[in-house]
Amino acid sequence: MATDQVLFEQKGRLGLITLNRPQALNALTPEMVAAMDDQLSAWETDANIAVVAIRGAGERAMCAGGDIRLIYDNGIEGLADSAAFYHLEYRLNRRIKVFPKPYVAFMTGATMGGGCGVSVNGRYRVGSETLKLAMPETAIGFAPDVGGSFFLSRMPRNIGLWAGVTASQLRVADAVLGHLVDYFIRAERFESVIEALAAADYSDEPDEAVCEILAMNASAPDAPALKEYVDEIDAAFDATTLEGAVAALEGGSDWAKQQAAVIKSHSPRAVKVAFALIKAGAQSTFEECLAREYRMSLAMVSHQDFHEGVRSKIVDKDNAPKWANASIADVSDAEVEAVFAPIGDKEWTPA
């Protein structure tokens, strides 16, 4: 699918993807997702392509996520269009996850939601000093998707569970600590690293060549700000329920109390769904995570909290959402379980 919203070029044996909507923080549209899926499918078997890299145009964002405003504008009446978008987006995420050649993501600025889907799921993740990485969905009445329940649940010491429920932003040092970034490389070096990848000899071991180039250009990040809170995060989110985690945070440090307040300010339904989703993801394959997230996505975008969250955060920007439930305690376990209920012939599949 031809579109100038995403650009593809061959440089040597490097296939380079540039997300090209800088004015919209490179947010993903259905046309971009379809074009990327088609191009990666072609590059999988193209002997002239040894390595693929992805970056975002401009300095503000690699990719701020899926075009949530478009899904909001579709409304309940456009649920079929939203379902088609999520189905294709998750297929692209899986293609990236299992891509048979080295896939290098250059992450700078806002890299969030769907932006993590096209970067964190790749084989090599490069972060710059301006990186702001997040799965911010609970703040708008949604829950982490695009494989988020897989990679968040595999972050060390419950950091991913905390990050997914609170929708917290991670700077590059914290992303390295959380194993979501492999190499810290300053943004000013991105272009020269891409040129080095384009000029490299991949006749022997492409992965070795890629790692050598990335390591030569990498620096040690500053000490992660999150490090001093890891013990509190780990202890609190070891709870079997979100209510238990919040209670533990409220009995902790001032920082922990702030985290509890953040959770309670987000959609009660969304934070409980996110907690359950990420917990389940720890015991699931990547494909199982995507299938569960797809059920969740259809249930959540048709619920009033999603529309209220997008309205308050993105449309009106009054930051005063009126959630359907007054508190976390008002959201029953049955309501959470219903979000993940089988949907028959509408289930997500990789094909």
Image (cartoon, rainbow, N blue to C red):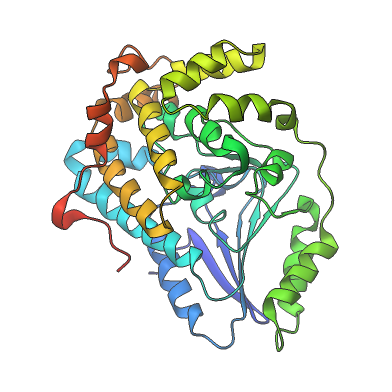
* Quadrant of the drawing holding the N terminus: bottom left
Residue drawn at 85 percent across, 64 percent down: 216
Residue drawn at 62 percent across, 42 percent down: 156
Residue 299 percent location from the top left of the image: 24, 38
- 151 to the left or right of 71: right
**Residue 319: in sight, yes or no?**
no
Quarter of the image for residue 285 reads bottom left
Above or below residue 274? Residue 111 is below
Residue drawn at 35 percent across, 55 percent down: 288
* Quadrant of the drawing holding the C terminus: bottom left
Residue drawn at 49 percent across, 64 percent down: 96
Above or below residue 2? Residue 235 is above
Residue 157 percent location from the top left of the image: 61, 38
Quarter of the image for residue 183 reads bottom right
Q: Nearer the viewer, residue 137 or 66?
A: 137
- 301 to the left or right of 103: left
Residue 133 percent location from the top left of the image: 60, 41
**Residue 198: in sight, yes or no?**
yes
